[in-house]
Image (cartoon, rainbow, N blue to C red):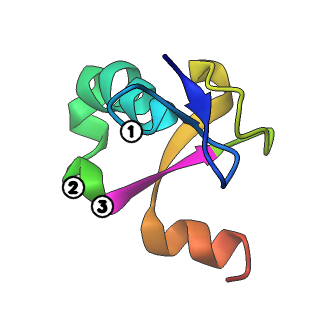
Amino acid sequence: MVYVDKNGYLKDENNNLVHRQIAYKYIYQKNRQKYPLRFSEYQVHHIDNNKLNNDISKIQLQICWLLMVKEGI
């Protein structure tokens, strides 16, 4: 069972964020040479700002502090 949490993200039956699972399997693990840090040090950025769109062409991994700078946080 997959559901939308209070923040608008998809979660699975184990309460895991679906976009992080997809990013880990299809981006992080397949391109380890590009991502030297631990997976937990990256945030998953939804390129189209659609939290429900977890297509790998619409998400990317970014270092946490870099994403904050880009979004002006």
Seen at 45% across and 67% down, the residue is 64
Select label 1 or label 3 by which is in front: 1
Q: Is residue 45 above or below residue 33?
A: below
Percent x, y of residue 73 = 67, 83
- Residue ID for mark 1: 15
**Answer yes or no: do the residues labelled 3 and 2 have beta carbons within 8 Å?**
yes
Viewer-side residue, 72 vs 9: 9
Report the front residue among 17 and 59.
17
Give the numbered dot on residue 41.
Answer: 3
Provide the secondary structure element on which disc 1 rests.
loop
Magenta-highlighted residues: 41-45
* Residue holding disc 2: 37
Q: Give the Cα distance between marks 1 and 3.
A: 20 Å
Name the secondary structure under disc 2: loop
- Measuring 68% from the left and 28% from the top, which residue is drawn there? 58
CA separation in Å, label 1 and label 2: 24 Å
Quarter occupied by residue 5: top right
Of residues 53 and 28, which is closer to you in this image?
53
Q: Earlier in the sequence, mark 1 or mark 2?
A: 1
Crowd band around label 1 with a 10 angstrom C-alpha radius: few (<14), some (14–19), many (20+): few
Image location of residue 19, percent across then percent down: 51, 33
